Amino acid sequence: MSSGLIITYFGNGKGKTTAALGVALRAIGYDFNVCMIQFIKGEWNYGEIYSSNRLKPNFELIIAGKGFIGILDDDHDISEHISSAKSALEIAKEKINSLRYDTVILDEVNYALKLKLIEERDLISMLQTKPPAVNIILTGNYLTDQILDISDLVTEMKEIKHPYKKGIRAKKGIDF
Ligand code: ATP
Ligand code: MG
């Protein structure tokens, strides 16, 4: 019996979402199906929105989050972020249990956890009861002891250099 992996990419360096998308690209090559659910919408995750159309029907992207939280142009009330993160978790549960996907990516779920938009016990119980064969990828810059414990693979993206630090803006095809 094949057993799916729980994979976590966290840390302050760039590459968490990119790594998850890399796994998706690889899996789709074998005609596996991948669903990615974005818990917190970044304003620049556009490349993958366009790619998801090209990778149909193997790749499904669901943008559940309400944008950046707590920064100046965030005009959403915290309760809106909470309800969209909670609905993202419900969608994730449905997708994982549907058995239609080999891999489900929960993008920024660790950050949603840090902001307390979702309950850790809800996420953990979803992971504990997932169908055995399904792979789950968790991203976001935060790692709790329980996520560390339940994951089979944990990689920390650690910032050594980032062009942003010398004033280079986010680049099309690299950052968004
Ligand atoms: P990416 O989506 O590029 O793989 P990420 O998932 O590791 O990045 P997020 O926290 O989701 O990181 O950040 C989203 C955006 O912020 C991306 O455009 C990314 O390039 C940029 N970014 C990531 N890490 C850093 C950093 N250390 N400094 C500045 N910008 C960053
Ligand atoms: Mg990311």
Image (spheres, rainbow, N blue to C red):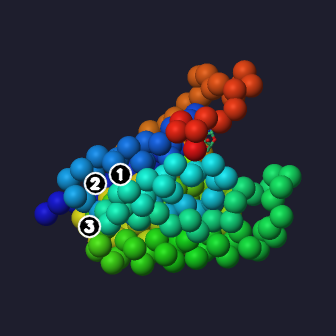
Q: Compute the Cα span from label 3 to label 1.
A: 19 Å
Tell me if mark 1 has few (under 14), some (14-19) or many (20+) residues whose alpha carbon lies within 10 angstroms of its own.
Answer: many
Residue topped by disc 2: 28
Assign the N terminus to one quadrant of the image.
bottom left
The secondary structure type at the circle numbered 3 is: loop
Residue topped by disc 1: 24
Q: Nearer the viewer, residue 115 or 105?
A: 105
Locate residue 108, reporting x and y percent: 57, 55
Locate residue 74, reporting x and y percent: 81, 59
**Residue flagged by tag 2: what amino acid is it?**
Ile
Assign the C terminus to one quadrant of the image.
top right
**Residue flagged by tag 1: what amino acid is it?**
Ala
Q: Are marks 2 and 1 in contact (CB under 8 Å)?
A: yes
**Residue flagged by tag 3: what amino acid is it?**
Pro
Q: Is mark 3 within 8 Å of ligand 2?
A: no
Q: Compute the Cα span from label 2 to label 1.
A: 6 Å
Locate residue 28, reporting x and y percent: 28, 54
Viewer-nearest of discs 3 and 1: 1
Viewer-nearest of discs 3 and 2: 2
